[in-house]
Image (spheres, rainbow, N blue to C red):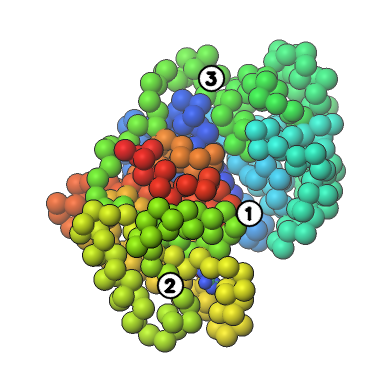
Amino acid sequence: MGANIVLGAIADDFTGATDLANNLVRGGMRCLQVIGVPSKEIDLGEIDAVVVALKSRSCPVDEAVADSLAALDWLRQQGARQLFFKYCSTFDSTDQGNIGPVADALLEALGANQTVMVPAFPINGRTVYQGHLFVGDRLLNDSGMQHHPLNPMQDADLVRVLARQTPHSVGLANRAALAQGADATRAHLSVLAKQGIRHVVCDSLDEQDLDVLAQATVLMPLVTGGSGLGQALPAQYRAQGWLDTISEPGRLAPASGGALVLSGSCSRATLAQVADFLAKYPDGGFALDPLALAQGEQQQQQALAFARRRLSSNEPVLIYASAEPDKVKTAQVSLGVERAGLLVEAALSQLAITLVNEGVGRLLVAGGETSGAVVSALGITTLRIGEQIDPGVPWTQAPLPGREAPLSLAPLSLALKSGNFGGVDFFTRAFEVLA
Ligand code: ADP
């Protein structure tokens, strides 16, 4: 071990981890995302920040706390100077947790008496004023998030929301305090600490507020929030002399190998991206249908043959189950929602394994669940974060120890896009960014 990373982050879900990692790179840190707490030693020689991706957003509280503490333990062993607990910019949680209980457990383990809550992500329209979270011009509880299937957010007052999740006192650092600057904000936080206030919800309307907060909190053992704060912190690490100026923190090894897009997302943005790809490459796509997949191996074999043919002449390939809502409904009525999804995920995962083993070196996956299935089928546990393709979606690179020589020498370039992310030309432009 003996690595000396600057920042260690614990993210409560996979795409949230990537979002934070992406912003840390943009702030100037060389960043690695690990999926779960690593079970074996990994080389962190050239790494400034590690984000551990957990699945702790909606699981039982005890599990979220235990997993987060295990991640904390591992990150401290890697020398992390500051810890960051990352959750969604819409503060996704319930009265049971998991934000409050996880933050309390991390504070206790660190022997710290206070942390900040900074969910704001102003460029994505998430701002906080007088402790109230806005999505665009709507309060959180009027933004659509009040209907979320797992964590309906029915209160925009984060001080009140968090107070229901923790036995400790919750306070506020409002815009008026931030307007006085970083020193005054730090003084305000320490006054609150003397009053026994353990959690401080912080206003932030724009990047400037996040800069003030980053400066005021850089010496706190633990900060919590969204990826907006993540982009502001690296400049403060440089000011502390903890981090060098790195010219290309997102620089990855040159990409090589065939280009493949696998899409299991039926979100509106993805459907437009599929259509855009097919307009550019009318013979470049193969559609999978869960009803056909349920009949046996035949359709998957046809997709494989199709992909091999195009890859052998160096042309990009799209294999997609993405379909319009009525078609999805038909499959779901006949097969059940879960079975339809699993059939698609299994087919795309198997295609990924075979084609990556045969030389695909640049892989795009569309769909949050789909990405999780493909990454786990490929046995990937670490992702080095590269350049951003579109907001929140970077290229990444993963070592693939299982690949046969000589391919085993080349890392796999991988971009994982959840549902509504990415511009309409994402499936083609991503490969141009990589070149
Ligand atoms: P998103 O990020 O857009 O929500 P996900 O991959 O998370 O995408 O979820 C999409 C789900 O829909 C996956 O479980 C996938 O297997 C399933 N699916 C994809 N295509 C179809 C289809 N044609 N019919 C039914 N289910 C589908």
Marks 3 and 1: in contact by CB < 8 Å?
no
Q: What element carries label 1?
A: loop
Residue type, label 3: Ala
The residue nearer to you, when weighing 30 against 394, is 394
Category of crowding for the residue at label 1, using alpha-carbon neighbours closer than 10 angstroms: few (below 14), some (14–19), many (at least 20): many
Q: In this view, does 234 lie above or below 290?
A: above
The residue tagged 1 is: 57
Q: Does the residue labelled 3 lie within 8 Å of ligand 1?
A: no
The residue nearer to you, when weighing 361 against 304, is 304
Ligand 1, image quadrant it occupies: bottom right
Q: What is the CA distance from the residue labelled 1 to the residue labelled 2?
A: 31 Å
Of the two numbered discs 1 and 2 on the same chain, state the one appearing first in sequence. 1
The residue tagged 2 is: 288
Q: Is residue 57 above or below residue 82?
A: below
Category of crowding for the residue at label 3, using alpha-carbon neighbours closer than 10 angstroms: few (below 14), some (14–19), many (at least 20): many
**Left or right: 419, with 292 as reference point:** right
The residue tagged 3 is: 235
Residue type, label 2: Leu
Q: Does the residue labelled 1 lie within 8 Å of ligand 1?
A: no
Of the two numbered discs 1 and 3 on the same chain, state the one appearing first in sequence. 1
- Image coordinates for residue 286, horizontal then vertical, percent: 38, 67
